[in-house]
Amino acid sequence: MPTGLFTDLYELTMAHSYFLRGLNQTATFAYFVRAPVPNRRFLLFAGLDPLLAALQDFRFAEDDLAYLESLGLFRPAFLDFLGRLRFTGEVWAMEEGEICFPGEPLLLITAPRIEAQLVETLVLNLLNYATLVASKAARILLAAGPEAVVVDFSPRRDHGTEAALHAARASFLAGFHGTSNTLAGKLYGIPVVGTMAHSYVLSFPDELSAFRAFAEDHPNPVLLIDTYDPLLGARNAARVAQELRERGKRITGVRLDSGDLVALSREVRRILDEAGFPDIRIFVSGDLDEYRILEFRRRGGVAWGFGVGTRLGVSWDLPALGGVYKLVEDEKGPRMKTSPGKVTLPGRCQVWRQGFRDLVALDEEEGQGRALLRKVMARGERLVPPVDLARRREEVRRALFALPEELADLTPAAAPTYPVDYSQALRAWVAAGG
């Protein structure tokens, strides 16, 4: 789908003026997140693949141009220019799933000024939300621990169908095990997970009848046991499990979605164990996030897995990420903002990682460690294949569970600090105002 018109109007009015004044020389813009970010000791970069695809589709369709003409804001020559426009720029970016920090460039776009300007809204929309959700998912995963199964249950509360797809992708990249979103499963190859709803149980004469029917119709079912009395539900699940065992079948698990999840999970575990079914797993859901999962575990709750919905998809404690996209270099050299509280780094930069400390240096400087920004697009064509989500997910999980304690700590920091430093040359440029 053409993505040219997905932009704020002021991008077009600026581009119109650039065009009329011949200001279309090569320029570089940087995407970064301003510091500090409340309640976040690190971020997880995500959304690059969707962005690269959108940049390759960047163009204005005929009906887009007709709409712009109807606004009466733009000269015909500019509209003709837009009709021929494609993204021809170069993109350097961190790899999706990279642990990163506010205050350092995560992506650089170098292109003719008009192209680089017009894609700003697209860049911010795709990277801010995906990075927001991936970072939230990473925290939830750390709270649940390396042995727990964690599933995205967010689509019904996400802010639109596109957001639900991006949330499923970002959370899987961060290490989740699956999603309830079947379209995301098809599009991204994410394992899909589902149990049953209370409406199913209510559609039968009684809970036991519902459990028997569902177990008959689905292999390895997970039964929702809190439509009525959760403890009676656990006993009914054990009864059906016994009936299935005699026929060579089994129940995989039971799900709790309400009430005192800690107390109920412990009592349900006891009931299932005493009935001879220690292998039936307990799956917990119901307005969970990293804070509630930590509390659940601290109080001795028992769960094999967690379904996380609303508080993941809307990033409940941090509903927006302050990622920005700023001009850092053009034909005149490095550029920077100097307004109070919004100073930007000038010039094309590279981020060098040494352990879990990052050094931001000017592109021409020699660095030590691992260079995090790599060229992923040139002349408007991507240079890297789409990310293998399953492979990358495993790498991200390993990195997350290897984080040093000060970064893996999920409690809010009173004054967040990040392991990011700047080279002497870059500091000199900033001190000189660019």
Image (tube, rainbow, N blue to C red):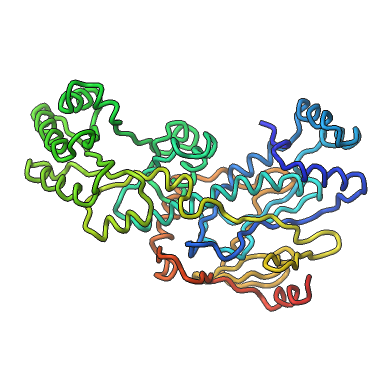
322 to the left or right of 89: left
Residue 203 % position (x, y) = 25, 22
Percent across and percent down for residue 149 are 32, 47
Q: Can residue 162 be seen in this view?
A: yes
Give percent across and percent down for residue 332: 86, 63
Picture mark count: 0
Q: In which quarter of the image is the N terminus?
A: top right
Q: Where is 173 relative to 102, above or below?
A: above
In front of the other: 333 or 292: 292
Q: Identify the residue shown where x is 84% and y is 30%.
A: 69
Q: Residue at x 70, y 65 (%)?
A: 344
Write down the quadrant of residue 77 in the picture.
Answer: top right
At horizontal 61% and vertical 47% (from top left) the residue drawn is: 384
Quadrant where the C terminus is found in the figure: bottom right
Q: Left or right of 215: which side holds 288?
A: right
Give residue 60's position: percent from left, percent from top: 76, 33
Q: Is residue 394 above or below residue 340?
A: above
Q: Is residue 392 visible?
A: no
Residue at left offset 47%, top offset 50%: 315
